Amino acid sequence: MIIRERYRIEGSLYEEALSYAEQSKRYTSDRHDFHAGGLNNKKRKMFEGKLGEKAIKMLFNENGISYEEDHSFADERDEYDFLLINAWECLKVDVKTRTENYHTRTLEMVEQAQSHPKDIFISVRLYKETNEVEILGWYTYQDMIMKNQIENQGYLDNYVMYDRDLRPVGTLESELLNRFVR
């Protein structure tokens, strides 16, 4: 299995992300503290998140991973970013995208984790100036619940997984993805 150091998002994948961000900006939640700044900022943040997702799509495609990409409408809540599918299991995957060097943690709102749980979280770093994405690590829902690290920066309660809490990128294949190769 090949896991690149960075994935450059361009062409049709870039256009998919941009189109989705434009369509969804009016429906993107105001409940996230990073959405100050109106519709343009919502579109930018959604676009950045979608670029992160496209890197994971590239990873799956290049390695023959059996998956289904989320196809919810722009005005609907995503139940997952990807479903990993094989004959005996189906796992919901959520891609968490960050954009700054000082971002050292991955967040999942407690309310969302309880009402719409995902099985796997993949944390990625988007380099905005080059549209390149680095996979930082991953964790399971159970990892997050067992850690039970909840922080509130004056807004909403979030489960927090610091970089030191993430499973290494190299274990994606051996502990997860090899079960889903077509």
Image (cartoon, rainbow, N blue to C red):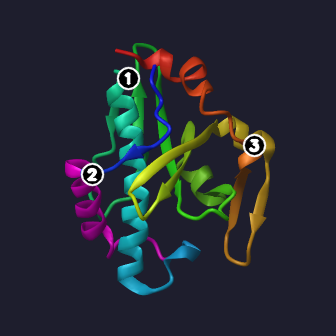
Per the model, the C-alpha gap separating discs 3 and 2 is 31 Å
Residue indicated by mark 2: 10
The secondary structure type at the circle numbered 1 is loop
Disc on the earlier residue, 3 or 2: 2
Relative placement, left or right, of 2 versus 162 is: left
Identify the residue at image location x=73%, y=51%.
Answer: 162
Q: How crowded is mark 3: few (under 14 residues within 10 Å), some or many (20 or more)?
A: some
Q: What residue type is labelled 3?
A: Asp
Disc on the earlier residue, 1 or 2: 2
Per the model, the C-alpha gap separating discs 1 and 3 is 26 Å
Q: Where is residue 142 in the image (x, y as percent from the top left)?
A: 69, 36
Q: Is the magenta stretch mostly helix, strand or loop?
A: helix
The secondary structure type at the circle numbered 3 is helix
Relative placement, left or right, of 118 versus 23 is: right
Front-lying residue, 167 or 146: 167
Name the quadrant containing residue 103.
Answer: bottom right
Q: Are marks 3 and 2 in contact (CB under 8 Å)?
A: no
Q: What residue type is labelled 1?
A: Asn
Identify the residue at image location x=60%, y=27%.
Answer: 170
Identify the residue at image location x=50%, y=38%.
Answer: 5
Q: Which amino acid does label 2 sit on?
A: Glu
Q: Number of marks in the image?
A: 3
* Residue 28 visible at all: no
Q: Position of residue 3 (x, y in %)?
A: 48, 30
* Residue 96 visible at all: yes
Which one is closest to the eye, mark 3 or mark 2?
2
Question: Which dot marks residue 63?
Answer: 1
- Point out the residue furthest to the bottom here: 37
Magenta segment range? 11-30
